[in-house]
């Protein structure tokens, strides 16, 4: 699995509605050309091509060997990305971009969860039970929370490297750790 830590420029480039959707589409469904992506995302090919080039400039997408010219194919350059929220203390644009991306991830989570709840009954019982949601309230310090998040991510990476079994489906797993009372900062 390839992972990239976003620098401030990459953060600012990705913090755009169409660009974030393009990257997600390529990660979920694999390489595609601008025409197919524009059709799937209900936009035009020119805008799609432009934003793919912007993503490529910061290493988030790359051209594949498939297709040429206007029919060239693009793929996500990594399986995942992240950033440290404290890496940009003197860059208000990067801070705003990071905030927008976090809010976009929350919107995506809410949309996917609502869609799943609408479709859940159509799925086999094993999937209905396995696709679950849970929460836990812990008392930890910042270092312990950081360690926990790294451990959970390591578990996800381990599963990503496994050979998919019969009947496998792509699943989206969101891992969120935050203070239970954000207004009560130390």
Image: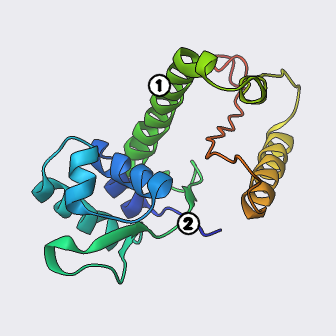
Q: Residue at x 16, y 79 (%)?
A: 69
Residue at 40%, 51% in the rendered image: 25
* Quadrant showing the N terminus: bottom right
Task: Tell me if mark 1 has few (under 14), some (14-19) or many (20+) residues whose alpha carbon lies within 10 angstroms of its own.
Answer: few
Where disc 2 sits, the SS reads strand
Crowding near the residue tagged with mark 2, few <14, some 14–19, many ≥20 C-alpha atoms within 10 Å:
some
Whole-number angstrom distance, CA of label 1 to CA of label 2: 25 Å
Q: Is residue 65 above or below residue 103?
A: below
Locate residue 17 relative to residue 123 in the image: left or right: left
Residue 45, by quadrant, is bottom left
12 shown above or below 3: above
Q: Tell me the residue that label 2 is attached to.
A: 4
In this picture the colour scheme is rainbow
Q: Tell whether 134 sits left or right of 17.
A: right
Tell me the number on the disc at residue 10.
none
Q: Earlier in the sequence, mark 1 or mark 2?
A: 2
Residue for point 27% across, 54% down: 37
Q: Position of residue 79 (x, y in %)?
A: 56, 62
Observer able to see residue 58:
no
Compared to residue 84, the image places residue 32 above or below, namely below
Q: Which quadrant of the view contains residue 184?
A: top right
Q: Is residue 2 left or right of residue 22?
A: right
Q: Could you tell me how many numbered marks the image carries? A: 2
Residue at left 41%, top 72%?
59
Which quadrant holds the C terminus?
top right
- Foreground pick, 153 / 129: 129
Name the residue carrying label 1. 111
Judge by depth and name the residue closer to the eye, 36 or 13. 36
Taking 59 as reference, is 162 above or below it?
above
> Could you say where residue 22 lies in the image, as x and y percent from the top left?
34, 52
């Amino acid at each position: 699995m390839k992972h990239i830590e976003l620098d401030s420029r990459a953060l600012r480039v990705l913090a755009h509605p169409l660009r974030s959707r393009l990257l997600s589409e390529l990660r979920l469904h694999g390489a595609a050309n601008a025409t197919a992506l524009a059709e799937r995302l209900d936009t035009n090919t020119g805008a799609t091509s432009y934003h793919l080039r912007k993503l490529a400039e910061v290493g988030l997408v790359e051209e594949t060997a498939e297709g040429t010219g206007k029919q060239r194919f693009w793929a996500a350059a990594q399986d995942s990305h992240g950033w440290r929220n404290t890496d940009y203390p003197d860059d208000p644009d990067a801070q705003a971009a990071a905030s927008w991306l976090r809010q976009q991830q929350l919107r995506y989570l809410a949309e996917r969860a609502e869609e799943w709840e609408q479709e859940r009954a159509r799925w086999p019982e094993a999937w209905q039970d396995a696709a679950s949601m849970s929460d836990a309230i812990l008392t930890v310090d910042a270092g312990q929370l950081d360690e926990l998040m790294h451990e959970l991510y390591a578990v996800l990476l381990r599963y990503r490297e496994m050979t998919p079994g019969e009947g496998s489906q792509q699943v989206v797993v969101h891992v969120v750790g935050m203070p239970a009372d954000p207004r009560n900062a130390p």
